Amino acid sequence: MKLNDELTNAIASVTEAAAIAAMPWVGKQNKNAADAAAVAAMRERLNNLNINGEIVIGEGEIDEAPMLYIGEQVGNGKGEKIEIAVDPIDGTRMVATGENNSLAILAAGYQGSFLQAPDMYMEKLVVGKQAAGIINLDRSLEYNLDAIAQTLRKPLHQLSLAILDKPRHHEIINNLRLKGINVITLADGDVLASLYATMPNNSIDVMYGIGGAPEGVISAAIAKALGGDMQARLITRDIAKGNNAENRQMAINEITRCHKMGTDVNIKLPLETLVRNQDVMFAATAITPGDFLSGVCEQSDYIQTHSLIINGSTHSLRYIQNYHLR
């Protein structure tokens, strides 16, 4: 069943609401307040839609998050059964500090579209359409980069890779730069990095790194809709953040939660497992200005938003500039 424009536009209004709610917190050094405002606005707007929706990737599980938790029912219950993966703010720190490229984002599809996984870490490898089908997360990163370069008919030193600038990635970043690869580091926001790698006429060839599983599933929706490719692996906290007693205990809990959701850690998850059909959509509204979108702009009589909608059913992407009159 294809996602029609009416449904995608309605769902895209959810990210607009979240971005507008977060806007007053830009530069206020309070990322928690910004996130809370975006979450509340996103949930309120979802509950006004004519959908029978379920949050499958959200702010945590029911005992961890008061709103937009995994399994929460949203919408008025009168429409299509829809699965939703949300990240009310991709880049909360960037909102708090007033930096560019913070987004309100979500992905949606019909029931059974998305991998269900806890809010934990995920290793991700994302490429665009031209390199689809040749990546293999069971092989080394160097092997994959060689394969991507050969497929794109580029020398390795002309390959561009986006990765989060996190301590866990610093050794990888240094090694790649020694090989001459053009490494673009991002402070936050690996969904943005996935967009860089999969958008038409992209300047980035590949995104790699360990980030959040919610962002990973949303990135997979982008790759699926645009004909790109992605592989992933759920990673326990002790591997991602350090092997200490607290992280080991959290890792045990993560493994248990994965098993309850029908998945497992440390196994390769191909794109077909992350997103099970083509009829999915992605929506993003910029909070602060960025490379793809203008940020929320407040005037005396209106608020202007700039959004991107990617529809896998039609293999299309649209930019929407809306004026919300006061």
Image (cartoon, rainbow, N blue to C red):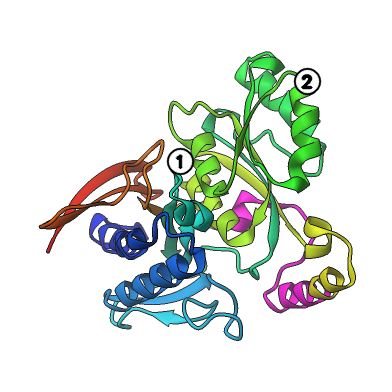
Q: Nearer the viewer, residue 87 or 244?
A: 244
Determine which of the numbered discs, if any, sits on residue 118 in the image: none
| 41 in magenta | no
Q: Image check: 221 left or right of 305? A: right
- Discs 2/1, front: 2
> 230 or 46, which lies in front?
46
- Mark 2 residue crowding within 10 angstroms, few (<14) / some (14–19) / many (20+): few
Q: Is residue 291 left or right of residue 187?
A: left
User: Which residue is identified by label 1?
Assistant: 226
Quadrant containing the C terminus in the rendered view: bottom left
Question: What x and y, as percent, mark residue 20?
Answer: 30, 61
Give, as a three-letter code, the residue at label 1: Leu
Q: Which mark is residue 179?
A: 2
Q: Which region of the structure is painted magenta?
A: 252-274
Q: Could you say which quadrant of the image residue 14 lies in?
A: bottom left
Q: Residue furthest bottom?
A: 63
Q: Is residue 12 left or right of residue 99?
A: left
Q: Is residue 104 above or below residue 36?
A: above
